Every structure is written in structure tokens, then in C-alpha cells.
Image: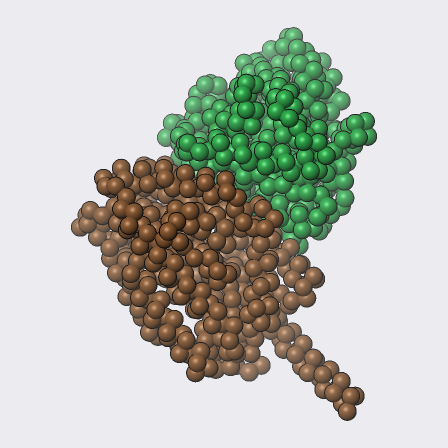
Chain colours: A green, B brown
Amino acid sequence: MTLTAYAPLPVVEYYKDVVEDREFPTVREWRRRTGRKVAGSFPVYSPVELAHAARMLPVGLFGGGNQIEIAHADSRFQSFICSIVKSTLELGFIDKLAPFDALLFHSICDPARNLASVMQRNFPDRKSIYVHLAQNMTSAGAADYLAYEYRRVTKELAEVSGYAPTDDDLHASLAAFNAVRARLRELYALRAASPEKLSTTELYTLVRMSTFTDPSEAEPLLAESLEAARARDARPKDRIRVVVVGSFCEQPPVELITGLEEAGCYILDDDFLLGWRLFKRDVPLEGDPYLALARSYLDDSLHASTKHDLRDPRAASLVTSARAHQADAVIFLGAKFCEPGLFDYALYRRALEKEGIPHLFLEFEEKMWMYDKIRTEVETFVESMLFE
Amino acid sequence: MKNATEIRYQGKVHELQKELMGAYYAQLTDIAKGRSSQKNAHLLIAGNPVELVRAFDMLPVFPEVNVLQIAARKASLPLIQKAEELGYAVDNCAYVKADVGLYLAGYEAPYGTIPKADLLLCNYVGCNVYLNWFEHLSELTGAPAVNIDVPFIRSADGEPSTEDIAYVVKQLEELIAQLETITGKALDWNKLRRTVELSAYVGEMWSEIKSLTKLRPAPYDAYFDSVTMMAVLYCLRGTEEAARFFEIALADLKERAASHKGPLPEERFRVVIEGPPPWPFLRVFRDMFTRWGAVAVASTYSTVGGIWEFGFRHDPDHPLESIARHMLSQNLCNRNFLQRYDQMERYVNEWDADAIVIHSVKSCRLFSAGQGDMREYFVREKHVPTLLIESDLEDPRYFSQAQLRNRIDAFFEALTQRRVTAAADAAGTAEAVV
């Protein structure tokens, strides 16, 4: 079923199956073509420029989606642990991680924290690198420390890739990812301004493509898609305008995103694949590149449920975003058992109720493949909004 | 199976603990009721800078201790449900929910009243929920909050780097400035050094107490009885009262050890227990082990707030650096999961344990996430009999008594059978040799 009356975007058409393919065909092809190494990056945010500067391909690792059965990892992680942790481990057990030479994990939540260790123990030949992302945004020592951490991680990556990057290499990588993120910001701005021109399903596929494609190849594809979408002549439909939050780590199936749209929502903002477009502006290319990257994380990044910035509460920020996007409602689309997301929901709900912004709580699992119940809930919600 | 009858023990230690904790909560209540102008900081158990708080004559408040005591009194569920009405999920940590519920209930607990924080001092030591917890308290109560960002241990040798230590020290210096503003007085460095010295002294005695369970029989249960001493270790560390308490506890336990007294009439199995206890059903849970003559000789839970048994001591000559070291690497929570495997393996070998019991709690994923892999490691690679059971530390809805008892009974039956078989084999071998 097509979402729009206009011509599909060629890049989206090409990549719509690739993004969910756990054989990672384009990554394997890149390895063959370049002879270089690959660094898998567990959500949410990863300083991917470090791997790129070390001549590796950084690739987003978003679990098994609804493409694999979890047969082995269930015995390692309990039933109350989110799916992405188990399915990522399962990918290792069923040898789907063969194209990856190193895996990056981050201080985002406790299961992800322990997953880094479990991965290292079960797959000792594939280096697990744990990145500590600072959680004290106001300390005068935070930026320097994070820059130190990035240097340490780079050294570990260099041991895998066999190439120790210079500052010039890292500056070049910052510029390459700046270019990708700039295009993603433009795509997000286009969708917010004219959601009838670019569906979230399309946008999601484009962002996802950028998580496993070399930035020098991804940027032109994004630019081409942006231009094509801008040129579309589409009339707005009778839908409600919503902001979606809660899917910053484990990703909902694309069919579920499509279902939200088809049920009558224009999604104006979301936190899908958040880490890959985290920065509000380009990372400055002057001076110490490690420090610049650290400062962008601390002071110039979007809100994330795994980044605890006491200067700027996330619930207040969600209200601001909903107002700025002239949203009719907020949909919380949270991954089952995702503790950071579920914690945020309690504060979101409190703030949204205080501000009189309607909201809907939905829970998903990456491995789900039946969407009727959620779709009915959204349709009912939309109808209640449209006919108020 | 031979039923072992439980005996009451630790009478003196237990009574003194009750007295000290009662006085501590009376102080908190005085602040909450406006009878005292003493300032307080809420902070978390795992690797914290309580010595700094004490050096400013502030009282530390530990939400984890507050809510576990409520759970032990079987009063946690209404508080948890109060938080869930606010939008917290059934899958959120029940410690946090009980604490939020306690705040919503006016901070009135069965053992006293908790004062609103002058500072929410979040020592982010491995547990990501800590960050959420104090962020929520700040939004709900309006109290100021600060995160002390403690880098997770990720080095191969398990030691923090020079930069890790310098970063935490820098934040402690910034914290000192905040505490000076809150209290209106400058830090008394001599007082800090004395507080750190007292922590070192208590650490030394606690370490000695822990080594006593290497004896046969162990003079106390290193899981169920340790919690009595942990309350003082954590809530009163850095005080003269804590030092006196541990002097008495050490003397008492040494005396028991010298007279070969254990917590049970017969020590049939020596186990290492991993994971926090199910506070709402502590006695019931303990009895499940007691009836088999199983005594914990070591436990990881007793190291959540600090690991002293492997040699770490606070250093009064380098107070901030040693507090930073404690926060970074000398507590269970900020060490990586595989370091915990190593810690447990040391317990099995050095404390001469027969088996491991992993109590997996839903609320605390720092502890529990991946414990299936831990079991695999010990069973398949180390050949240590290992039992994995599940319930919760705060939420009584996750405690299935019959199911737990069946699992525990089956485990110890198998261990018993194993011993019988091994004895028969040994006898057969001996006969063959003769």
C-alpha cells in the first residue's frame, strides 16, 4: 500500500529492504571493495567519527528487528530485558555479526552495559569497546575528560583497524559526518514544514541508510532525496500533527511507523535513530577535534533519554518541541522493557497533562509483526482528536 | 533431608544496629519536622562521597535504605502503586517507585520522616537508573540536583586511569564549593581527613569480619546477616558511632568463630549468593536455605557500597583521591560484569564454597541483566553448581514462594545426591586400591 500519490524516492525504494537485512549486504560489499574493517555501533549515540578516522566503516547495530528468532540469547538475558539486547547477542550466536571487527557500546542503560561484557566473553575475537559518555554536563572537567575518552577509544579502534588516525584525519571525518547530519537536519525540517512531501517511513529509511553507508556515499543520496521530496507537489491530508518520542534505541518495525501514518498522523518530529543525527549544528572544525566532538555532545546536542542534562529537563523540552511544531498531540512509542524510556514517560505525562497536550502511550517490540491492535488504538485516538 | 533448626544469633550486634539506626532516623525526623536546622543530602549507596557530606556536618539520606526498610516491613506495595498511578511502568525499578510513592505520601515512613533534600547528590556509579531517580526527584520536589559522573571501569586490569581519578576529584572539588554554599561554611579539611580515617578504620574491620566466613563453620551468614552490618556501614560510615559498632561486631564474631559457632546447628552447604535479597520476604527466603543447612560464606550484595575485602582502604592523607578511587573501582556497581564473575570466582575458591545461588531481581538490571550468561560461565566453564532464581528486591508481586522453594529444594537435593554419589565413588575407589 503506498502512502502517497507522488513518485517514490529511488533511494528509499532501493534501501527499503536493505535496512532490515541482517546479512548486512552493503556492509559486506564495502568490506570486499575496500579491504577495510567495520565497527558496529550499539545505540544510542556513538562518536562514529573516531572509527571513520581510523579508516573503519561505522555501522549502526539495531538488533535483530523482526527478522530473526531469539533461540540462544534468551538463556543469557532474562525475560524482562528489552529485545534489542537479546537480539543483538543472538546475531552473534547465529554468526550474523561476521562483517564486524569491533563493537562499540555506551553508558546508556544497565542491560546495554552488561551486554558489552557478555559480548566480550562470548566473542573474544571481536573487540567490545565500552565508551563512557559523560553525565555531568556542568563540570568544568567534563569536556576535557570526554576528549580524553575519545582518544582512548580511538586508540582501541586503531588497534583493530591497524591505522592510527591523525588530527587531520579526524577533522576530515568530522566534516564528512557534519555533511550527512546537515542533510538529515534539512530532511527533518522539510518533513516538519511539509509532512505531505516526505513521509516518516521514507525519512526513516533514509536515516537508516546513513547508519551503514560511508558518509561520502550517503550524503549525495540524502541530497538527491531531499531535492526530489522538495519538488513534490502534494496536498496535505486530513491528519493530526504529532510528535513521537520513546524510540531512541530499539527501533520499531518500519511497518509500525507506516501504520501510525496510515492511521491518520503526520509525524513532525521523532527520536528514531536519534544518535546518528544528535548534533544541532556542525561540529566545529577548528582546534582539537576530540575536544570539539566532546563539546558538541555536551553542549550542542538534542535531548536523549540516555543523556541526563540537568540544565534542561527533557519533559519541558518535549513540551517546547510540541508547541514549536504546532503538534496536536504527542505519541509515546516506547520499546517494551526500555527503562530509560519508561522513566521518561512518567515525567512526560506529567508535563503534557499540565500543559493540556493530548498524548497516547504505545508499547512496541522490535520483533512484533502484528500491528492491528496498535493501529486501532491510534485510529481511535486520531478520530477523537479530529472530531473533537 | 535433615531439617536444620534456625537459631537466633547476632543478638548484641543486631540490637546495637537497631539502636544506632533508630538514632539516625530520629535525626532525619528532627530535620523533617523543623526541629533541627541541619542540612541534608540525598545520595546513593554504591560508591559515594559520604565522607564529604559528613565533613560538612550534613546528614546523608539514602533512599535505597529508606525503601528497602519499608519493603522489609511489607509496606512497599501501596507506595509502588501510588507511583504507577502517576505513570511509572510496572517494569521500572521498584526502589525508585517506592521512593516516589514515599515522597507523595509526605515522606512519612514507619521508622521516621524523611526530610526533603537540600541537595540531590547523584553519585552515578554504574547504575543508570540512579540518574533517572534523582532527575525525577528533582522535578517532583524542586530540590537542586547534581550528577557526579563516575567513569565506568573499562580497563583490562580493572583499575581506573590517572585521568579517571583526576576527573572525579575535579567534580568532588566542585561539589565542595556547592556544599560550602549550602552550609554557609568552608570545608574543614582536618575534619574531612578524620572522617576518611574513620572510613578506613571501619573498612579494615569490615574486611576482617568478611574473612571470618572462610572458617568452618562460618560464624555468620555473609548474605542474610551481612545486611545488619551493612546498614551501619553505609548510613553511618565516617562517624565515631560506626567505628564503635564495628569494634563490637568484630569482637563478637571473632568470639563466635573461636568457639566454632555458626548461624545454624550444622553447616551442610557453603554457598556464594549473588544479587540483592527479596526484602519483602527476607525471612521466608532465608528459611528456604536454612532448612537445607546452607550458609552464605560470601555475597556480592555486601559489596554494592564498597569492596574492602581485597585490600582497599580510604586514605586520610589523600582524602579526595581515595574517595574517588572508592567511587571508581572499589564498589561492585561501577565494575564491569566480567569483574563480577572474577569476584565470585574468588569467593568460591578462597571462601571454599560448594555452590553459587544467583538471585535475579527484576528491579535492578545492573545486577541482573545477563545473569543467564553468568550461570553458563560457572556451570560450563568452572563446573560450579549454580542456581538461578528470580523475584524482586522491593515489589512483593514478583515473589512466588512455592516456585522458589521448589527450585531451591531441587537444587540442594541434587547437591546432596552429588555428595552421596561422590562418597560412594570414593569408597569404591578406596576398596579397589585396598
The front one of B427 and A327 is: B427
Picture coordinates of residue A212 (x, y %)? 70, 28
Q: Name the residue nearer the viewer: A142 or A89.
A: A142
In percent of width and height, residue B233 lies at: 38, 60
Residue A123 screen position, x and y as percent: 71, 48
Please give the name of the residue rendered at 73% of the width and 82% of the height, measured from the top-left corner. B425
At 58% from the left edge and 54% from the top edge, which residue is drawn? B339
**Quadrant position of residue A31:** top right
**Residue B296 place in picture, x, y as percent:** 51, 70
Residue A204 in the figure: left or right of residue A67: left
Q: Residue at x 57, y 33 (%)?
A: A150
Q: Residue furthest left?
A: B35
User: Which residue is farthest front?
Assistant: B317
Quarter of the image with the N terminus of chain B in it: bottom right
Could you tell me how many numbered marks the image carries? Answer: 0
What quarter of the picture does the C terminus of chain B occupy?
bottom right
Position of A286 relative to A98 (above/below): above
- Identify the residue shown where x is 48% and y is 48%: B328
